[in-house]
Image: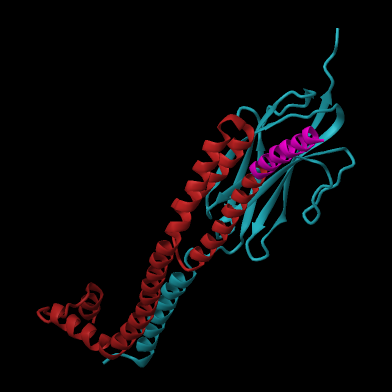
Chain colours: A red, B cyan
Amino acid sequence: MKKLLVFILFWLIILTIFNSCLCYDDSLIKSVRDTYSRLVDAEEKGADIREVTVKLNRALQLIREARDNPENRGILLSEAYALIEDVNVNIPLLIREGESKMFWRNVAICSAGVLTAVTGVLVYRFGPRIFWETWLRVRSRWIVEVKKSRKDRSDRHDR
Amino acid sequence: MIDDEVKAVVLAIIIVAGALIVAQLFAGGKVVEPFSAIGLLGPKMKIGDYPKSVLVNQTINLYLYVDNHEGRTMYYVIYAKLGEKSTTISENVSADAPILDVYELILPHGSNATIPVSITISEPVTNAKLIFEMWVYDPKIDEVIYHGRWVQLWLNVTAPQIQ
């Protein structure tokens, strides 16, 4: 009876370890997906997430490699975990940078609009005067000479 | 000094040019027609040289090409399924077939990836369809949903001859 209990206990421990290994895989995938969700939010706020996406992709690759390579499973999964954590740590900074970028982009758009309107008004108001003043300044020294065409001269001669 | 009509024309040109610039600033970088693409490449990473007949448990080496033009970063989940001649698949309904393997990747907008695929089939099948379906992870509902894109390869999987 005692032997049977030890046997059952042994198998329970083995199964728990095996199951926890399998779940670790899934929990890492879940972490990647949660991190991706946070990245999507960050991207909507204007963050540039290209660099961290590469890291997250690498983490997915490592999780896959861990499935195919049970000998290095522990190392590969811990490396994947470290990458996911690294991305998670960087997200607030990326959001801050993104928000700042968005702010300056909006400022640029508003400035462009205001500048266009102001330019329009200024050109409407002062454009013609500037144009004619420039025209006169450039051509003021021109001498206008009246020349008679050959036709006029020949007409007079005929008469 | 200058006609009112000329003034109006000058003003109109300035307003139209300004509107175009502002519109460009607002709409710049926005994707009008978002799409994702999936392609299957042969063992030499080119279109062609696809295996037509393989042995049971023989490794089929192919490459999957995934392209993102959705206007945002996407989380793709590609399911490799083994279907039969009668297996149906469409843009709305994924194939009802056993899953052989799963490939997951994250792609930013405007980027693509070519991933190696190694698959073995454990039983003989005539006119088998090796299907690669594109699914995407939707963070709003926390689920992987079928994206309506797939590629397939017709195969005959034969048992090795025993002499």
Residue B46 visible in this rendered orientation of the protein: no
Q: Relative to A144, does residue B68 appear above or below in the rendering? A: above
Residue at the spot x=87%, y=43% of the render?
A: B87
Quadrant housing residue B143: bottom right
Q: Does residue B66 show up magenta in the picture?
A: no
Question: What residue is shown at x 42% (from left), y 58% (from top)?
Answer: A90
Q: Which residues are magenta?
A: A1-21
Image location of residue A125, percent across then percent down: 28, 91
Residue A124 appearing in the image = yes
Quick one: quadrant of the N terminus of chain B? bottom left
Q: Nearer the viewer, residue A57 or A8?
A: A8
User: In the displayed structure, does residue B73 sit left or right of residue A148?
Assistant: right
* In the rendered image, the vertical position of residue A158 relative to residue A76, given as above or below: below
Q: Residue at x 38, y 89 (%)?
A: B5
Secondary structure mostly seen in the magenta stretch: helix
Residue A16 percent across, percent down from the top left: 69, 43
- Where A44 sits versus B9, above or below? above
> Which quarter of the picture shows residue A74?
top right
**Pick the front one: B44 or B18:** B44
State yes or no: residue A5 in magenta.
yes
